[in-house]
Image: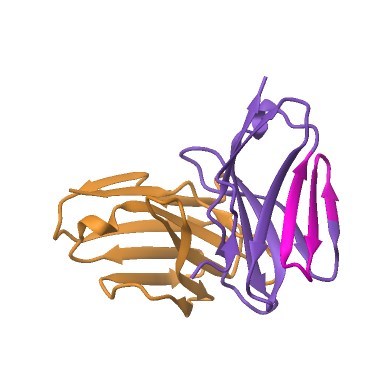
Amino acid sequence: DQQVKQNSPSLSVQEGRISILNCDYTNSMFDYFLWYKKYPAEGPTFLISISSIKDKNEDGRFTVFLNKSAKHLSLHIVPSQPGDSAVYFCAARGSNDYKLSFGAGTTVTVRA
Amino acid sequence: DTAVSQTPKYLVTQMGNDKSIKCEQNLGHDTMYWYKQDSKKFLKIMFSYNNKELIINETVPNRFSPKSPDKAHLNLHINSLELGDSAVYFCASSQGAGLSPLHFGNGTRLTVT
């Protein structure tokens, strides 16, 4: 039973434009949300996070938005660069949970 | 100075064999994890240890047994390997729960023939 869902398996965007990745969750106990980036043959690397008391968190070109009432979050990458081509995973956990539940991932391809 | 390292990177073995994957972290974290990424690319948690104590034990066949000799190491032993065990296994560590991110190793690709 997938509690974190990324319904777009892939996204293609032109270099310099905005990439928007979406994530939905079903567990209302989730309080912390993290995004990971993964290159082939490497482990996922942490990108950015947000807690449920905020609706936006920004770090350089990456911004995460959280709509808790809709149980929806999104990751914006502006501007997109070729090095951003990777698989992006959305993940979530409860406030006292160690278990981090992952979505299925979205493969982003940035075209030159 | 790799933060989370796991060995081997590739493991090819036959059905019925027993194999182990080792993981070490030098971040000083108190919690370590094993995740499995199957052919559909889902990352699913298998086990977690906090200060050498098992805190997460998902529905995993008991052929899989984790062992944590100290908080910097978490090994995964698999008995009687089956074809369906073929996957990429990731080790990770974190300092606590909440917003503390997991730091992942580069994975071990296990192929059972």
Q: Give the image quarter of residue B82.
A: bottom left
- Residue B49 as seen in the image, left or right of residue A89: left
- Residue A69 as seen in the image, left or right of residue B56: right
Q: Position of residue B20 (x, y in %)?
A: 29, 59
Q: Position of residue B91 (x, y in %)?
A: 47, 58
Q: Give the image quarter of residue B51.
A: bottom right
Q: Is residue A91 magenta?
A: no
- Residue A8 as seen in the image, left or right of residue B99: left
Q: Vertical placement of A41 versus A92: above or below?
A: above
Colour mapping: by chain
Q: Determine the main secondary structure of the stretch shown in magenta.
A: strand
- Residue B59 as seen in the image, left or right of residue A57: left
Q: Closest to the observer: A67 or B60?
A: A67
Q: Position of residue A14 (x, y in %)?
A: 71, 26
Q: Vertical placement of A35 versus B76: above or below?
A: above
Residue at 28%, 47% in the rendered image:
B11
Residue at 30%, 65% in the rendered image:
B77
Residue at 17%, 65% in the rendered image:
B80
Q: Closest to the observer: A75 or B1?
A: A75
Q: Is residue B99 visible?
A: no
Magenta span covers which residues?
A: A57-77
Residue at 54%, 53% in the rendered image:
B104
Letter of the chain shown purple in the rendering: A
Q: Is residue B75 visible?
A: yes
Q: Drawn colour of chain B?
A: orange
